[in-house]
Image (spheres, helix red, strand yellow):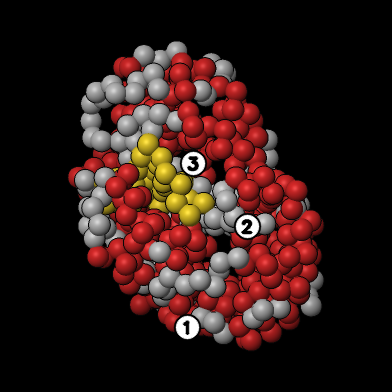
Amino acid sequence: MTDAVQSGVTAAREGRPGDAARWFRAALADNPGNAQIRSWMGQALCADGAHLEGVAALRDAGIALARAPTAAGRGPAVAIAAELQRLTAVPESLAVLDALQRVDASNPQAGYLRAAALAQLNRPADALAAGRRMAAQAPGNPAAALLLASLEHDAREDEAAERRVRALLAANLAPREAYRARKLLAAILDRRGAYRDAFAELERAEPIAARVPELAALDRTVIPATLADATAGYDAGLMSRFKGHAFAGRPAPVFVVGFFRSGTTLMQQILASHPHAFVADETPLIDAALRALAGLDPTQRPVPARLAALDADGIQRLRDAYWTAVEKRFGPAALDAPVFVDKMTMNTINIGFISTLFPDAACLFMVRDPRDACLSAHLQQMPPSAATAPLSSWTGAAQFYADVMRWWLGVRGALSLGWREVRYEDVIGDFEGALRPALALAGLPWDDALARFHERGAGRYVSTPSRGQVMQPLYGTSLARWRHYAAPVETVGPILAPFVEAFGYPA
């Protein structure tokens, strides 16, 4: 091992990814054909926030390793493809897996990853064909069978999907697979109108969630503590301190926020079809500014108190950290776009911080009937996180919705940024009428391409469970869906009633 490689490995182990990337870059200059060094450099760059460059390095390394003459030599390519999917670099992961398949299509893990990638890229027919090949290579593997069942469900082959899931549930599944199977069966039953049976599956899934390792490991105190600090700390005085200040750099973003399943992905896809907008999908860019704040003030005081101690130069440094993260993640194209849209649904929780940092920003807050939003969120299989953890419980989903919306309703009148609530139901019922005022706030003119947003869905990665819906024209079957579940909705009625009233929905 060369000195540069050893120094890079040491820096990576010590949590210094920027130094590691520099060492690996130096080593690569002496060994440009070494795919392993390129992959290490890619990992270090991604860990340092240089996502765009790091992902490209990982993709190129993975493709090179996929062409190795032996199965053992090709093994690292599969690991790189998995890492790329974890980084949400799904097209790049698929490029590695396609290269691997051209050499050797017999690896079941690679087959699993490829089928999953095709599904995430809204290619359901290709995903199903890949899933069938993968499942044939891994007979008796519950994870493979579950993926195939979900792909059958995506392709609307629900009879086959239901048979497969029920056969799995007849076996002794581990908690992770049992939980996923129950949630998938609920979605299948919901689509064919067996609503009582669908909710019964959700009830069976709920106690299993506590035994799913990824869910059990989550810290469920983080978000309640953040909301408590925000409620106590943000007021009009703090958030408007620098309203009208001439900050350097590009104009502030447009933020699209709300609650899970409230229409944020729909708004994201609509705005992404606008020729003057660049849209970031569920990327925690605001975390870069929060980390910069921690660097300026490493005390354990609540975030609002630390913000209050900053002058305009301090706020400028936080804004610069945000835009640096944007450029590292998406490249110059994001900065060159007339309007940059930051769609991160649960940035609702950070809206006080955002308003203080970007008093010149615009915020589109998506609203949906609280009963429909909670029901849809509870039905979905969400990636595990502190924000999605409460959704595994029906009462927990409703209570979490109430906590978030209580914060929003309390703070919206004090925000220094421009904001507008956009009702999901209005977008469905009067597309242009609902969109024109939202576009005006965002600084975007009307464009006829907006009405054809669904035509751009195939082949595009969408991080949320709404991925299949972005390929479809607007439809009204999801409106007032909660009425099919009137009995369970009634059990959380007292929790949601204040918000049903506040947002003007019929009881």
Q: Nearer the viewer, residue 74 or 427?
A: 427
Q: Residue 25: x percent and y percent?
A: 28, 41
Q: Residue 168: x percent and y percent?
A: 72, 77
Distance between mark 2 and mark 1 Cα atoms: 44 Å
- What element does badge 1 sit on? helix
Q: Residue 108: x percent and y percent?
A: 53, 74
For residue 477, which quarter of the picture? bottom right
Three-letter amino acid code at the position of disc 3: Asn
The residue where tag 3 is placed is 347
Three-letter amino acid code at the position of disc 2: Pro
Q: Report the residue at 56% width, 66% height from top.
A: 479
Three-letter amino acid code at the position of disc 1: Ala
Left or right: residue 282 versus residue 327 is right
Q: Report the residue at 52% width, 44% height from top.
A: 346
- Taking the image as drawn, is residue 369 in sight? yes
Q: Closer to the N terminus: mark 3 or mark 1?
A: 1
- What element does badge 3 sit on? helix
The residue where tag 2 is placed is 506
The residue where tag 1 is placed is 129
Q: Closer to the N terminus: mark 3 or mark 2?
A: 3
Q: Quadrant of the N terminus?
A: top left
Q: Quadrant of the C terminus?
A: bottom right
Q: In this rendering, which labeled residue sits more in front, label 3 or label 2? A: 2
For residue 191, which quarter of the picture? bottom right
Q: Report the residue at 52% width, 17% height from top.
A: 305
Left or right: residue 481 versus residue 16 is right
